[in-house]
């Protein structure tokens, strides 16, 4: 699917006029782009009969969730409240998977009460608790083992999850003990294997490495006469933060084809994915206003009214977002440090960024904020949570 229309920074004059009438900062969501992205996901995954679950942690805005649900994606949840939210937004119990390394008893009970499709489990102690809580309800919980494949995703250290040094998953050297423990658990049903190697992965070779490792691990289970029905390879497909106009929709065709080419499924096995950022990332823009332009030593500071409270990724991951001045009429350019108002030196969106000459009152668009933007917002410095417009 080739997407040619530019949505993200080339706003129409009518849209910019509308923006000028609104209180900044705010999140702007382009629902038409989200629909096109969802169509691409459904069309390309359906070619292989793959199951896609939307990772709620990327964005839990109600409008976003309800639109995604219309495309019949499942829900990948990592908290009890996300499970509740999925139910509220119309996702069926059979569509919901509950992952996470630290599920509380209350969260597990919530999931059991809602008869979710599967728990992705990360340790023997967690399996023991789920078994005990399910027994108390006279229920059987379907579980998948999240296995740490020890595959290095070439991404930021804070968002890699598939190495033995990470807190996630069960290591291969633990699996014999896990199988022994499962044999004594009467209230869990082992139906799947789960993997996830990280986030914002742009080199598809990393996923090829995952496929080959999954094949090895499947053979380990096969040697023990174990074949599960469901293989979940997680998510992690990245987006183009530097060129969102040119690449507003990730290459889902190549992504799903790679798994079809390299993963070896047994008959009747189903392949599941948990995609978040790649679905919602490019449909969101953070619109802000320039409060002051302050002289600096090497560059001037463009101080805007959005901060790390609205978009924490640059402060947390040293992440880069493309930034545009929407309202300047200047034909000259200067370098600016684009910074927010929060009392932290890390409250900075870009350093020495070349922008048209910028002045107080100009509108600034920070692109690619549809994932891990609004959902990670805080009220640090007692700031208000800002609204979303569509």
Image (cartoon, helix red, strand yellow):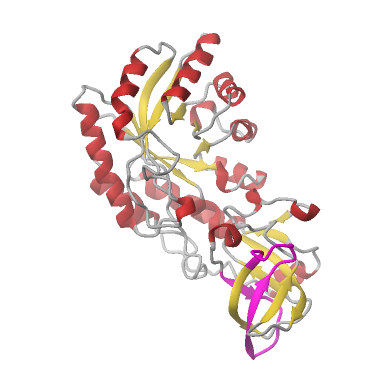
Please tell me which residue is depicted at 60% across the width and 61% down the height of the picture: 315
- Horizontal and vertical percent position of residue 187: 44, 13
Q: Is residue 34 visible?
A: yes
Give the quadrant of residue 292.
Answer: bottom right
* Total marks placed: 0
Q: Which quadrant is home to the C terminus?
A: bottom right
Left or right relative to 303: residue 41: left
The verdict on residue 330 being magenta is yes
Residue 241 vs 235, above or below: the answer is below
Q: Is residue 265 visible?
A: no
Left or right relative to 303: residue 200: left
Give the quadrant of residue 253.
Answer: bottom left
Please tell me which residue is depicted at 54% across the width and 56% down the height of the picture: 281
Left or right relative to 15: residue 153: left
The verdict on residue 383 being magenta is no
Nearest the viewer among 373 and 86 is 373
Q: Which quadrant is home to the N terminus?
A: bottom left
Q: Residue furthest bottom?
A: 332
Residue 265 vs 152, above or below: the answer is above
- Horizontal and vertical percent position of residue 176: 28, 24
Nearest the viewer among 280 and 348 is 348
Please tell me which residue is depicted at 61% across the width and 55% down the height of the picture: 31
- Horizontal and vertical percent position of residue 18: 76, 67
Please tell me which residue is depicted at 46% across the width and 27% down the height of the picture: 118
Q: Residue furthest left?
A: 223
Which portion, as a residue range, is magenta?
A: 322-348
Left or right relative to 229: residue 24: right
- Horizontal and vertical percent position of residue 121: 44, 29
Give the quadrant of residue 51.
Answer: top left
Nearest the viewer among 39 and 181 is 181
């Amino acid at each position: 699917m080739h997407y040619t229309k530019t949505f993200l920074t080339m706003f129409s004059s009518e849209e910019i006029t509308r923006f000028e009438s609104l209180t900044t900062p705010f999140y702007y969501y382009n629902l038409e782009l989200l629909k096109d992205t969802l169509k691409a996901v459904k069309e390309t995954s359906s070619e292989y009969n793959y199951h896609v679950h939307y990772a709620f942690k990327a964005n839990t805005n109600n409008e976003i969730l309800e639109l995604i649900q219309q495309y019949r994606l499942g829900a990948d949840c990592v908290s009890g409240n996300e499970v509740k939210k999925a139910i509220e937004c119309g996702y069926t119990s059979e569509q919901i998977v509950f992952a996470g390394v630290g599920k509380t008893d209350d969260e597990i009970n919530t999931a059991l009460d809602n008869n979710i499709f599967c728990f992705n489990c990360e340790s023997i102690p967690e399996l023991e608790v789920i078994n005990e809580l399910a027994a108390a309800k006279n229920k059987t919980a379907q579980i998948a083992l999240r296995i740490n494949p020890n595959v290095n995703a070439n991404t930021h250290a804070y968002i890699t999850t598939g190495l033995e040094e990470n807190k996630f998953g069960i290591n291969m050297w633990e699996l014999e003990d896990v199988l022994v423990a499962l044999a004594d658990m009467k209230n869990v049903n082992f139906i799947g294997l789960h993997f996830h190697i990280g986030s914002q992965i742009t080199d598809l070779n990393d996923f090829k490495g995952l496929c080959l490792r999954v094949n090895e691990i499947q053979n380990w289970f096969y040697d023990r006469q174990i074949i599960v029905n469901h293989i979940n390879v997680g998510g992690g497909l990245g987006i183009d933060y530097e060129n969102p106009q040119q690449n507003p929709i990730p290459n889902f065709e190549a992504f799903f084809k790679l798994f079809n080419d390299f993963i070896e499924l047994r008959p009747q096995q189903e392949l599941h994915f948990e995609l978040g950022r790649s679905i919602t990332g490019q449909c969101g823009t953070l619109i802000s206003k320039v409060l002051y332009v302050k002289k600096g030593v090497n560059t001037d500071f463009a101080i805007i009214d959005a901060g790390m409270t609205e978009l924490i990724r640059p402060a947390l991951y040293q992440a880069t977002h493309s930034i545009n001045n929407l309202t300047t009429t200047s034909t000259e350019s200067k370098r600016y440090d684009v910074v927010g108002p929060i009392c932290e030196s890390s409250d900075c969106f870009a350093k020495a960024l070349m922008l048209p000459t910028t002045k107080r009152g100009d509108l600034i668009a920070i692109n690619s904020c549809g994932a891990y933007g609004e959902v990670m917002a805080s009220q640090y410095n007692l700031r208000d949570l800002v609204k979303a417009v569509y």
